[in-house]
Image (cartoon, coloured by chain):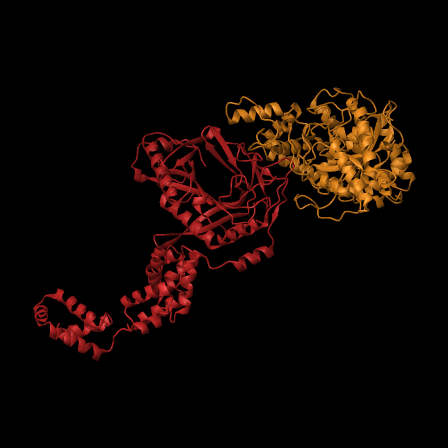
Amino acid sequence: MTEWLTATETARRIAAGELTAVKAVDAYLARIAKHDGELGAYLAVDAEGARAQAASIDAARAASAPLGPLAGVPIALKDVLVTRGLATTAASQILGGWIPPYDGTAVQKLRNAGAVILGKLNCDEFAMGSSTENSAYKKTKNPWDGSRVPGGSSGGSSSAVAAALCSASLGTDTGGSIRQPAAFCGCVGIKPTYGRVSRWGVVAFASSLDQVGPLARSVADAALLLEVICGFDPHDSTSLDEPVPDFRKALTGDIAGLRVGIPAEYFAGAIDDEVRSAVQRAAAILQEKGAELVDISLPHTELALPAYYVVAPAEASSNLARYDGIRFGKAAEGARDLLDLYQRSRGQGFGPEVKRRIMVGTYALRSGYYDAYYKKAQQIRALIKRDFDKAWQHVDVVLTPTTPTAAFRFGSKSSPVDMYLADVFTLSCNLAGLPGISVPCGFTTDGLPIGAQLLGKPLDEATLLRTAHVIESAVGLADRRPKGLA
Amino acid sequence: MTAPDTHDTEPTAAASEWEPVIGLEVHVQLATKSKAFSASAVEFGAPPNSLTDPTVLGLPGTLPVFNRAALELALKLGVATESKIRARSRFARKHYFYPDLPKGYQISQYDEPLCEDGHLDLILGGELRRVKLQRIHLEEDAGKNMHVGAVSHVDLNRAGVPLCEVVTAPELRSAEEAAEFMRALHRLVRWLDISEADMEKGQMRCDANVSVRRVGEDRLGTRTELKNINSFRFVQNAVEHEIARQIRILDGGGRIEQETRLWDAVAGTSATMRTKEEANDYRYFPDPDLPPMVVDGNMMGSILRSLPELPAARFTRYVREHGLSPDDARTIISDRPLAEYFEAVVKAHPGDRSGRMIANWMLTELLGALNADGKDIGESPVAPATLSELIRMVEDGTISGKIGKEVFEETFKTGEAPKAIVERRGVQQISDEAALWEIVDKVVGANPKQAEAYAAGKDGLFGFFVGQVMKATQGRANPVITSDLLHKRLGR
């Protein structure tokens, strides 16, 4: 069963000649064919392209050509990542049928590293949501319990990784969209520091918050992928011109003296008991391994949600102005004039949650209201960032639950605000531009995965990975697989 | 702007009691090789949609990267207009839906523009008049819609081209001043190689805000915005037309509606484009894809050092130091190569009292000959030093002005040095009094009847004698000495 191998091990075997890339790809394609009808993780599978890529990797190896660190590893991508020649929909009708003429930078970097692109994964429309229920195309199930959501917005990414329908995947995270689905599906998911990974070729949701990151079945795999996709990109003016460390070398297992902040605000209030105790056990593990636990306060945490739901919709309302049905995607038929064409195309092409956010964002940016909403939200952002800056004087990482609860059932969040509250622990990280990781730390009695979140200093992904790796090794859940999919 | 008030409906007053208030918003295309936020090339007249890339097309996932070359050009303009330059300015998104705007927003600047509080000097009535500039900011151009019958096409070649928007204070007082402002700005941006500013190519475009108020009133009247006025003449015509329209309405007891009007240059009228109610809410906010634009001391220093003497300063210097007429000075500074040519002639010329003469020769003979050949000053076959050599021969009396013009024509055509032409043709002026006396004496002796008639008071005959002397000398006689000697010989 090569499908359950880690990406690290798959890459090693292919490089060593113990496995061919074509064989690895075929194994995943067979598994997708068998399980994805039920799971619904993929929006598009590029069997032909993947086999061709795999064959060229095998040919390169046969010719003793140098191989990239991901040579032959079958990866799948959230469908907001722009892929040359491969339909990219952002799970929206309005982009239906659009075949991009270019690859995004993260995708290009994966290809350069030898990764094989299996296909495109489902998500919430334009990455707006926490359950993948907002996809215009299909429902994606949680591999651990088919009646539950895989999280969102990168729900296809978490589901496919957890079910071994790919070796690892990329997602995007604007307010928790990598970490929350990773937690719900028992994967490792990391959102890098804002600016670490280029946003060139990422269908924009909220430009000042969006980041690309990996979802994987191990911390080592996440480190491997992260190292490949990070780095300065002249195509993205917000990209950071900073050296990219060897993240895999960070996984030393040594956290002696590490100061771990435990913020009171993340353990109080509406949080599931099983989740709280699992994260507390993770804290205890870190302490056992030589870390020091420090009680801290991040007093502006409760303002993260309202600030986020101004900033993100405002930027989204602007970023989504280009979808008019004329140059790409679907133009509505029967329009009387230009305005009617815009209204019909956008009215038909966007789903309800996207429309809601466009309206909220448009309202917030109205002339005369900028100061009261967008500017105020940016001020709150600065306060949240300052909370963390103060915390970094005392601690190296912050440990929190990734989500207040484990994966919820389809349709169980009756109001938009209920749904927004599912992201309450992950928003601050984006607002402050910090790196954050979710690592599995336990299971509920119902057999649902629980994620622990670690937040780090800017550019200090290495410490997050090292700490997450210690938790991963100690809880020993790596071999646990969803029933019926093993 | 303030809303209309009761002044609009006061009893009719004579038209002369209304005072126009005009502010201009001028878009100047910056002369960069590539677009403002992508590597796509900038060119005029390329096949439609050939100058695009994923960013210009606004494809999902694309991002803007600012072209620093545009910043340098904008800074030059900011420094040349003595504007306050913001050390950190921001790009903002301006939203509206239109097919020529691929992203659904234009990247512009809003509350943190690059330049503020500058000024530009106009030449009006032979003097400088200073006009305040509220701001100069950077933005990208939109594409172009083309309507062919029932079908509309979009050409995005122009989309993303960098522009400077120059906004004046509302302190222009006539259509003539508005047109003059455009000329002054046009001159300046060309002078500094900021823009080619070819209005026919749309590289410089103007919108005008026009209102009128009673003379002596401080408050501004309700304004209208005129769009699409894209030549100096159109600016003047459109603004004149709008002032007259507003006065007509107010005199008739009506009130001005705040609206945007489109100027139709062919029909010579304007029509409502959109009313205040239809105005867009642009929902400006800082573009999160672009970090603040930082101007540091080094950059400012190198711009300051590279800035040449500006046209308005030169105008003043030419009038004051070289004694040029304001009209001549203005013509010479209208084009930097022309002004540099003038500088070069002056530099080659001994003494500093010849400016007026140099200007005359340049503007009459040189420009006349160049125009006739369809050449511009950069292609002049007569070098500045050559023109100086010729003018010197006229100044020191070696040749007459008349001969000088002939010599000029020849040197212009053949490139032969004026001195060589004069020597070869033997056309040096005769200023030797004894030699001229001999000729004068002979001419008067040969025409006794005319001499008698002149003596009897027929003044008109003097010219006849001058003509005879010139004929006898093939035009080489020094006219001043000739005239002196003729008076002496003729007895009055």
Q: Is residue A394 left or right of residue B112?
A: right
B44, above or below B274, in the image = below
B369, above or below B279, in the image = below
Q: Quadrant of the N terminus of chain B?
A: top left
Q: Nearer the viewer, residue B16 or B450?
A: B450
Residue B422 screen position, x and y as percent: 32, 72
Quarter of image, res B63: top right
Is residue A109 visible in the rendered structure shown here?
A: yes
Q: Is residue A133 left or right of residue B214?
A: right
Is residue A262 visible in the rendered structure shown here?
A: no
A399, above or below B425, in the image = above
Q: Quadrant of the C terminus of chain B?
A: bottom left
Residue B58 screen position, x and y as percent: 60, 37
Quarter of image, res A319: top right
Residue A80 screen position, x and y as percent: 69, 33
Count of numbered circles on the image: 0
User: What's the colour of chain B in the image?
Assistant: red
Residue A194 screen position, x and y as percent: 71, 41
Residue drawn 42% across the image and 34% down it: B261
A418, above or below B381, in the image = above
Q: Is residue A324 left or right of residue B353?
A: right
Q: Nearer the viewer, residue A140 or A54?
A: A54
User: What's the colour of chain A in the image?
Assistant: orange
Quarter of image, res A413: top right
Q: Is residue A234 left or right of residue A279?
A: left
